[in-house]
Amino acid sequence: MSKSKGDFLMMEDTINELSTKATQFACVNAGDSINDANFFRATADTTILSLCNEENWIIETLGMDTVRTGTTDEYNFMDNVLTNKTNRSIKETASSFTAMQFRKGILVGWFEMLHTSNNYRIFCQSSGIPMHSIVVTKWAETLVIMICPVFPNRSENM
């Protein structure tokens, strides 16, 4: 942002325009290094919508009768992929947050987790194989825990 280019925002104006949660997420996503932060309104605008969509999807999916149940022995290839990527995201996000690299933690703990679950959803829809309840539950619990440092209230609600 630059005053000379006219896209400068005061913090109070940003919070009033975008909400505190969206501003907080966009600030975390703006950068971790000593370089100038890159605050994007688009990130702030889409954050709340994305959070609401994921929360609704989790509630709907875990409440559906069409989700497969069973043991971990019954996992197919994509169940294993989502489980492995979830486990990897846990380690990377924890490492990033421990090192105070919140942007990197959000990139892995939010954006990458959503991308992985979208691939899983597409596979399940196109193949006609229902999602596995254990896999979806682990993914959802992990996502909620990983966004807790950035969105503690939202995580608690979810």
Image (cartoon, helix red, strand yellow):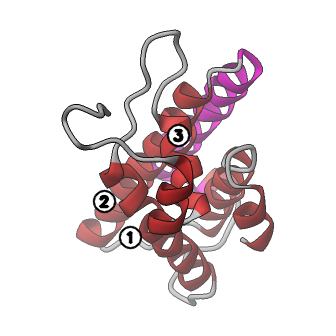
**Is residue 107 positioned above or below 13 on the image?**
above
- Label 3 belongs to which residue? 27
Q: Residues within 10 Å of mark 1 (few under 14, many from 20)?
A: some
Q: Earlier in the sequence, mark 2 or mark 3?
A: 3
Membership of 91 in magenta stretch? yes
Q: Residues within 10 Å of mark 3 (few under 14, many from 20)?
A: some
As drawn, the label of residue 24 is none
* Residue 85 visible to the viewer: no
Give the residue at x 50% y 76%.
57
Q: Residues within 10 Å of mark 2 (few under 14, many from 20)?
A: some
Q: Are marks 2 and 3 in contact (CB under 8 Å)?
A: no
Q: Secondary structure at mark 1?
A: loop
Q: Are marks 1 and 2 in contact (CB under 8 Å)?
A: yes
Instruction: Spot the residue most to the top.
Output: 34
Position of 153 with respect to 88 (left or right) is: right
From the top left corner, tell me how far across and down residue 156 is, in percent. 80, 66
Membership of 66 in magenta stretch? no
Could you tell me how far apart the alpha carbons at marks 2 and 3 are, in whole angstroms?
33 Å
Give the residue at x 31% y 74%.
128
Image quadrant where one finds the N terminus: top left
- Label 2 belongs to which residue? 123
Could you tell me how far apart the alpha carbons at marks 1 and 2 are, in whole angstroms?
8 Å
Q: Magenta stretch?
A: 74-99
Give the residue at x 34% y 43%.
40
Instruction: Report the front residue among 100 and 81.
Output: 100
As drawn, the label of residue 129 is 1
Instruction: Report the front residue among 49 and 54.
Output: 49
From the top left corner, tell me how far across and down residue 147 is, in percent. 66, 49
Amino acid on which the number 3 mark rests in the picture: Cys
